[in-house]
Amino acid sequence: MALCGALFLALLAGAHAEIPGCKIRITSMALELVKQEALRFLEQELETIIIPDMRGGEGQFYYNISDVKVTELELTSSELHFQPEQDLVLQITNASLGIRFQRQLLYWFFYDGGYINASAKDISIRTALRLFRDPAGRMKVFNISCQASISRMHAAFGGTFRKMYEFLSVFITSGMRFLLNQQICPVLYHAGMVLLNSLLDTVPVRSSVDNLIGIDYSLLKDPVVSTSSLDMDFRGAFFPLTQGNWSLPNQAVEPQLQEEERMVYVAFSEFFFDSAMESYFQAGALQLSLVGDKVPHDLDVLLRASYFGSIILLSPAEIDSPLKLELKVTAPPRCTIKPSGTTISVTASVTIALAPRNQSEVQLSSMIMDARLSAKVTLRGKALRTQLDLRKFRIYSNQSALESLALIPLQAPLKTMLQIGVMPLLNERTQRGVQIPLPEGMAFVHGVVTNHAGFLTIGTDLRFVKGLRKVIEKNWPATTVGPQASSAPPPSTAAV
């Protein structure tokens, strides 16, 4: 009975789980690129290590080591990989660290001072990041584990007390090696929990697309990590800005991601595009009114000839009135994605009228327009763009079949008017694109679109258009850039 109850609850939870409108998969192919940029950033962070002064004595020998600074860091061998239950693991081996510090030595009445160069060898670092969905729906780092160790250290002692330094070098370098071990993991903790999270804060969650609609890219659940990929499910829903709580039920096919040959795969369902068009419809944007000089001249002449009988019955003062052509979408357009391509179906009313100045309009005709647009989707930079093209067009009367026959001569000129006057306006907006949820400083390149039944996928690669440090410094207050700005976990417990 307990097993049946658990199965029932699992099925019930699955039935109410929200279907994502957008999915993103980051594959292991992207990790080499990410690793190189991360290592550059990590080198800069480790060079900010602050090592406290060391002072002490042995018999009549007293020393003071101060002003310790990291001068260079060489990360010889490193690996970044996905690992279930730990998400993202960075392994660094055989690294080395250059150090410069000031020495002060007192032996009986003799004093010696100056700077010494030292090096830490065979440094090993292993750090793992755990990722989760925060309450706002953004991916964040919520836990970091770290192990760091320095196998050996060497200092180039010289001067009057070189022999004495060599005698005490093991003692001094062991102490410095211990202090270094204590500093590495707090730096990595700060880099992940504070700086990396500030970078993830640049990923859009709920943002405006234009002055009419916005888009919701909140994560629906924690990222799912396998040995070869990291998968993220996003709501991927547009909404009218005037109706912030408005939502369209997602009844579309859930996108599927199977490939792993490219760095990144992005998938969009029909719901993603439907919610955009319905949001514009709810915002009252899917209508167009052309009056007087805005109506193409050839179309104006044809319309006046077609409705000459109706116009001639009007008073002489209204015959030369400006012509008005009004198109208004009557229902939210719908997107259909098939392996053969993507199409958008639109139904609108077309009203033709005379618009005398300072008088009521005189309607000449009202008809229904059905249009089918083909949509070519591309991904450029981090913007999803769509190029629309009018493929099929039909007008008919909702009054009688006889009136529909009378509208046949208007079929071609109205289609031409849509192609010349309306489609450029639509494409001007769709070509601006919609941002994909990607951190600042990164962009997509070489995207290839593949259509499936009910969704499309885009296989693409990544590139950095701006370094991690520049992005983080831009988005993080200058007063909190050091590792001391955040609380750190206990240092690594690796053997010193």
Image (cartoon, helix red, strand yellow):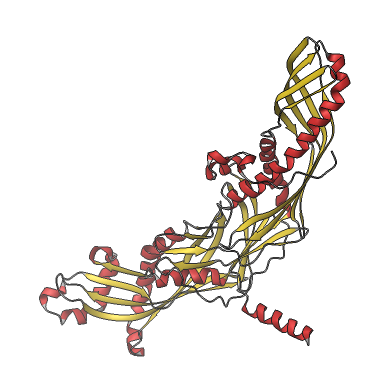
Say above or below: 416 vs 144: below
For residue 164, side relative to residue 290 (left or right): right
Residue 446 sits above or below residue 123 on the image: below
Residue 75 visible in rendering: no
On screen, residue 57 versus residue 320, left or right, reads right
The percent position of residue 25, horizontal first and vertical second, equals 67, 60
Along the line of sight, the residue nearer the viewer: 88 or 333: 88
Quadrant location of residue 114? top right
Q: Position of residue 443 (x, y in %)?
A: 59, 50
Residue 363 relative to residue 419: left or right:
left
In this picture, residue 250 sits left or right of residue 209? right
Image quarter where the N terminus lies is bottom right
* Figure disc tally: 0
Vertical side of 186 occupied by 426: above or below: below
Image x and y of residue 442, in percent:
59, 48
- Residue nearest the viewer, comparing 45 with 170: 170
Q: Provide residue 401's location: percent of width, then percent of height.
A: 36, 89
Q: Nearer the viewer, residue 487 or 462?
A: 487
The image quarter containing residue 110 is top right
Residue 107 appears in view: yes
Image point (66%, 45%), residue name: 190
In which quadrant is the C terminus drawn?
A: top right
Front residue (pair 328, 398): 328
Q: Quadrant of residue 98?
A: top right
